[in-house]
């Protein structure tokens, strides 16, 4: 199967909902069929061809070219294939995806990777609030897969996350890993206030050292060593490079909590 390239014609007047425009959904379709696929525009639906020109591409991926900051749910419920965005994306990018690979060369809006259960979402720029978190009104956050943010992430990163891996190379906002149930988070920069608030299990690694996070008094120093566990985790994170490359060669301090909720999670501060 050859890939497809969608090139933005012009910025939309209203926000556009791109759910359903995925590599698997477009497989086997003709250009004319793809151009007629309906997408949400405000409170109506318009053909995809109103916003994008469609052309076959020599690769295997679906490539969308242009500034998609006003286009939401890019890669929504992806179940396979490769999707590349050459530009920014709006809210809910990669939300509920279960497999495949979504790569964004720019920034992403709020709720990127919300409730994703598998696959890889890689954002070259920044991610907004509630990345790897829950949909409004839901109780389960990210449940699997990998989210990589090369820039910064906003508030409530990984709120109610249950499984999976999140890596942020830059800084994160307030309430990092709030109400975390399980999973692994690694931060290359600094964290805002109340990191780990209400977390029950899971691990949060601060690669930048003690100055990266202000520990809450509801997190207590761990008395037991975890050398074997740390080496396994550190080597897995180190393959992503950047601030995580040296982790296997560095010492750590573990702090357990959130004791305010009887939690058994850990904030790992790298020395």
Image: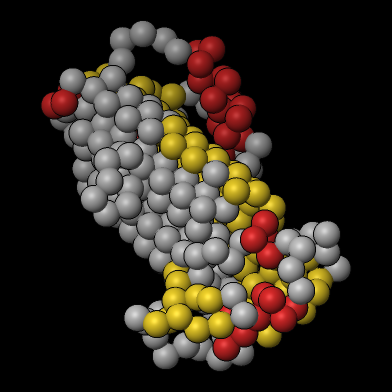
The tally of labels here is 0
**Residue pictured at 57% horizontal, 34% vertical:** 237
Q: Nearer the viewer, residue 168 or 248?
A: 168
Quadrant position of the N terminus in the picture:
bottom right
Residue 205 against residue 8 in the figure, above or below: above
Residue that appears at 18% across and 20% down: 262
Instruction: Confirm whether residue 215 shows in the render.
Output: no
**Residue reaching furthest to the top:** 224
Q: Give the left or right position of residue 246, taking residue 229 as reference.
A: right
Task: Examine the image and state in which quarter residue 10 appears.
Answer: bottom right
Q: Is residue 91 visible?
A: yes
Above or below 24: residue 200:
above
Residue depicted at x 65% and y 81%: 35
Q: Quadrant of residue 209?
A: top left
Figure quadrant of the C terminus: top left
What residue is shown at x 27% (from left), y 41% (from top)? 139
**Residue 259 locus on image (x, y percent):** 18, 23
Q: Is residue 183 above or below residue 68?
A: above
Q: Is residue 224 above or below residue 138?
A: above
Where is residue 188? Give x, y as percent. Answer: 47, 45
The figure's colour scheme reads secondary structure
Q: Residue 124: x, y in percent?
A: 57, 61
Where is residue 268 drawn, in percent x and y?
39, 28
Going by the image, does 175 lie left or right of 85?
left
In terms of depth relative to the viewer, which is nearer, 95 or 269? Answer: 95
Between 79 and 153, which is closer to the camera in this rendering? 79
């Amino acid at each position: 199967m050859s890939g497809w390239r969608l090139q933005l014609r012009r910025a939309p007047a209203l926000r556009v909902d791109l759910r359903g425009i995925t590599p698997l959904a477009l497989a086997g379709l003709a250009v004319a069929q793809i151009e007629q696929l309906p997408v949400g525009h405000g409170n109506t639906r318009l053909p995809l061809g109103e916003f994008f020109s469609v052309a076959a591409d020599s690769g295997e991926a679906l490539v969308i070219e242009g500034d998609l900051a006003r286009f939401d749910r890019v890669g929504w419920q992806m179940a396979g294939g490769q999707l590349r965005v050459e530009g920014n994306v709006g809210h809910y990018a990669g939300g509920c995806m279960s497999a495949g690979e979504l790569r964004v060369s720019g920034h992403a809006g709020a709720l990127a990777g919300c409730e994703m259960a598998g696959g890889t979402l890689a954002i070259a720029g920044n991610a907004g609030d509630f990345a790897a978190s829950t949909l409004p009104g839901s109780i389960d956050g990210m449940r699997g897969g990998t989210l990589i943010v090369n820039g910064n992430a906003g508030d409530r990163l990984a709120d109610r996350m249950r499984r999976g891996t999140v890596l942020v190379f830059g800084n994160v906002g307030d309430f990092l890993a709030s109400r975390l149930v399980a999973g692994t988070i690694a931060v290359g920069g600094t964290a805002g206030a109340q990191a780990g608030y209400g977390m029950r299990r899971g691990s949060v690694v601060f690669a930048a050292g003690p100055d990266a996070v202000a520990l809450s008094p509801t997190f207590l120093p761990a008395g037991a060593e975890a050398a074997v566990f740390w080496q396994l985790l550190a080597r897995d994170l180190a393959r992503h490079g950047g601030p995580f490359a040296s982790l296997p060669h560095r010492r750590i301090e573990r702090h357990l909590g959130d004791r305010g909720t009887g939690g058994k999670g850990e904030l790992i501060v790298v020395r």
